[in-house]
Amino acid sequence: MLDADTVAQIAAELAEADRTHGVIPRITARYPDAKIEDSYAIQGVWRDANLAAGRTLVGRKIGLTSKAMQQATGITEPDYGVMFDDTVYPSGSDIPFDHFSNVRIEVELAFVLKAPLEGPDCTLADALAATDVVVPALEVLNSHIELEGRTIVDTISDNAAYGAMVLGDTRRRPDEVDLPWVPGVLYRNGEVEETGVAAGVLGHPATGVAWLANKFHQHGARLEAGEIILAGSFTRPMWVERGDTVRCDYGPMGVVTCRFV
């Protein structure tokens, strides 16, 4: 385990990289013995500093829940990070490209909870019962750690590479749509770049929500009513540049768009 001073130092480095939109050397290159517990401790220090500065937590993102994402990153287990209110954009928004580093887009479904959800034995049925509505969403990835050779320790420390979320206008109760078969056709500047279906996320996108509730139980916490849970991408991440227009067609769940300026 890393000592508290080292954890605080790395959290400060990541906060500065977030402020300057820069990239720092891999944590695991400098601290090869760092564990997953260390990475969540680093993320926690960064999170608490943001809360103390007045930002409002609105939900959690789950990452690396699909084979597509695991193969794209070489990381084989899910992770999670926090989402603040000032990172949520409505569909059709202009997204400031310079606010992020290593900018990529993922195709996801977001679950808005109407009841608390906690482990240790949370099931898919429990996650669906606690969900108010499901919303199509794009996640903007924002990586402040060099990508080559990174491990899950690096990614978790960097708030699971979360940058922003673009929420669609469609709201559906979980029983109104066959969630595993929600499609995603992702376009960049009018050309199809990625396709997938939501079953790519652990067989059912809400399985990730149940996984997160059980993971939180290990830390003595739970998911709260009103939180937005971004359940994980069912396509590979798509690189974007300034000036790109992004559109994703979710079939029965509608369309989400944004532009990077």
Image (tube, rainbow, N blue to C red):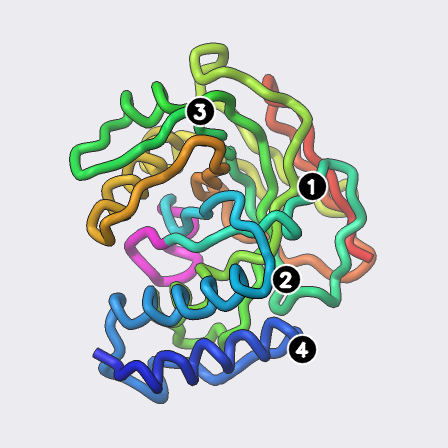
Tell which of 54 and 91 is nearer to you: 54
Identify which amino acid the numbered label 2 is placed on.
Answer: Val
Earlier along the polypeptide chain: callout 3 or callout 1? 3
Kindly identify which numbered label has been placed on residue 114. Answer: 3
Between the C-alphas of marks 4 and 2, the distance is 14 Å
Between the C-alphas of marks 3 and 1, the distance is 32 Å
Kindly identify which numbered label has been placed on residue 187. Answer: 1
Kindly identify which numbered label has been placed on residue 20. Answer: 4
Where 180 falls versus 235 (above or below)? above
Q: Residue furthest left?
A: 121
Q: Residue at x 36, y 62 (%)?
A: 74
**Crowd band around label 2 with a 10 angstrom C-alpha radius: few (<14), some (14–19), many (20+):** many
Q: Residue at x 58, y 43 (%)?
A: 194
Identify which amino acid the numbered label 3 is placed on.
Answer: Lys
Query: Does dot 4 land on a helix, a strand or a loop?
Result: helix
Q: Residue at x 82, y 57 (%)?
A: 261
Q: Which residue is mark 2?
A: 103
Could you tell me if residue 36 is visible in this image? yes
Q: Are marks 3 and 4 in contact (CB under 8 Å)?
A: no
